[in-house]
Image (cartoon, rainbow, N blue to C red):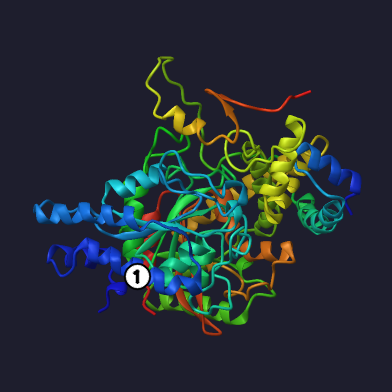
Amino acid sequence: MELKDFTIGQIQEGLKKKEFSAVELTEYYLDEIEKKDKDISAFLTVVRDSALSQAEETDEKIAENQDLDILSGVPCAIKDNILVDGIKCTAGSKILEKYVAPYSATVVKKLKGKGAVILGKTNLDEFAMGSSTENSAFFTTKNPNDLNRVPGGSSGGSAAAVAGDMCNFALGSDTGGSIRQPASFCGVVGLKPTYGAVSRYGLMAFASSLDQIGPLAKTIEDCKKVFSVIKGKDKMDSTSIESKEGDSDFEIKNLKIGVPKEYFIKGMDPEVEKAVREAIKKYEGMGGKIEEITLPHTEYALACYYIIAPSEASANLARYDGIKYGYSDLQGKSLLDVYLQSRESGFGAEVRRRIMLGTYTLSSGYYDAYYLRAQKVRTLIKRDFEKAFQKVDAIFTPVSPTPAFKMGEKIEDPLAMYLSDIFTVSVNLAGLPAVSLPVGEASGLPVGLQIIGKPFEEDKILSIGGIFKK
Amino acid sequence: MISKEEVQHIAKLARLGLTDKEVEKFQKELSPVLDYIEKLKKADIFGAEPTSHSVRVDNITREDKESDSKYDSDKLLDLSPARKERHLKVKSVL
């Protein structure tokens, strides 16, 4: 077996048996990045020196016969909207092109505390707004399965870095599908945790009531390990919650799986539907009970999301004002000129579109018709899931209606791009955990199955995903 | 379709500078999205309370006691584009 296929467990076995050192492993991945990333463009920043010195710490532990931590020596990548102290953090935006993080996100501290080695920062749609990485101000990441296609987004760089064997695992963030959709497009496992399960401290805010950080990895087992490290209450994020040790044991013959009829829609790629249906059949074949369920407010989810997310974004992105940090255009005469011009040249097209949309739906005269109404519809969407989970243990759906699309295919049509999130946004509105699991192919491209669970049942949905055999 | 004046008004509220060309571009791009979100008007929201967060969020309080800052304030000040000593420098407001 090659190093690139090693799981976290196998890496640690190898380290303990001294088959390779942590420095050798890190060098291997850094070399892979050097060779492959010219074509894939997953990384915005690679931090060779600090990665090697982190790896040395693990090697010293091994030399002193100390116990290893759960992620000791494991090379990973971090989406570039999550702060790592002392390293550039751009959010894929010109406005933060030269911004160096003055502190580390809680998740980064936790990863480092358990010995993980950070190789670099991965590309994303600007401020995580997009479904393809084409909205990055710097370049578009390519899908390692087909270089003419997008890796999905917004965590496209993280998904491509894992799928392209340039790191063992990566962190992404998911506001409306930004971990799950790229995981599906690239053929890796991606977990969007329950809202509050993972601290958002040090994650650049996009839509604060929807954002969550989560892992992308090649295996379910690795996703579980990374999640176990990053989760937990953090006093720096007042919405974070200590999740109870979830009961992840289940017997497949007692497992009730709900399949919502609203998630198999007209216009969906027939091969995607076939791959997802076949995966569901396999679970049935293993003894799972499949039930057709209904989530009646599904048709409103995307519209609801595209009011709530841009509204919150328009408020969150007010902080980029050309005064405190980031790009600043100081040519104008007044303070207002600095705001207008810094934000005009600093933000890209999609970010400005969403700020405009959010400002519109929050503006006087429209607030009740749009924002307040969307919050009420959000309640209905959440209730749909609560009702469904009284009957079933998990809900299976497709992740996206199509496999990875070609670069440029949707960039001129914002609404078509938004539609690729149609199966993922409800989960964020309801705050639930969901996994994207690679289960098949459509036209030779990976297809993901979405497994949605009850709040804080990440381990259970991961275990359910773990019994799937291709 | 959303009017030119509306686009200009929203851009001003959002503190986004726009060229004339961009005003037209936003008119074209925002209109189909606004039409799409009109969908929500069909939803029966009778009796539904608004949800701002999917989990219950309560105010978290602490004792009003001073503690050491976790941040190196110089590091934060260094990030600002214009400063004078330990102050951020801005242009005149009026």
Question: Does A210 appear above or below A395?
Answer: above
Looking at the picture, how far across and down is residue A202, in whole percent? 46, 42
Kindly identify the residue that appears in the image at 51 percent across and 26 percent down: B59
Kindly identify the residue that appears in the image at 81 percent across and 41 percent down: B10
Quarter occupied by the N terminus of chain A: bottom left
Q: Is residue A377 in sight in this rendering?
A: no
Residue indicated by mark 1: A31
Looking at the picture, how far across and down is residue A99, in whole percent? 52, 44
Task: State the residue in front, B8 or A41.
Answer: A41
Task: State the residue in front, A165 or A153.
Answer: A165
Is A213 on the left or on the right of A51, as rendered? right
Task: State the residue in front, B84 or A95.
Answer: B84
Q: Amino acid at mark 1?
A: Asp
Q: How many marks?
A: 1
Residue lying furthest left in this view?
A65
Kindly identify the residue that appears in the image at 74 percent across and 66 percent down: A412
Kindly identify the residue that appears in the image at 67 percent across and 57 percent down: A302
Looking at the picture, how far across and down is residue A334, in whole percent? 76, 30
Q: Residues within 10 Å of mark 1 (few under 14, many from 20)?
A: some
Quarter occupied by the C terminus of chain A: bottom left
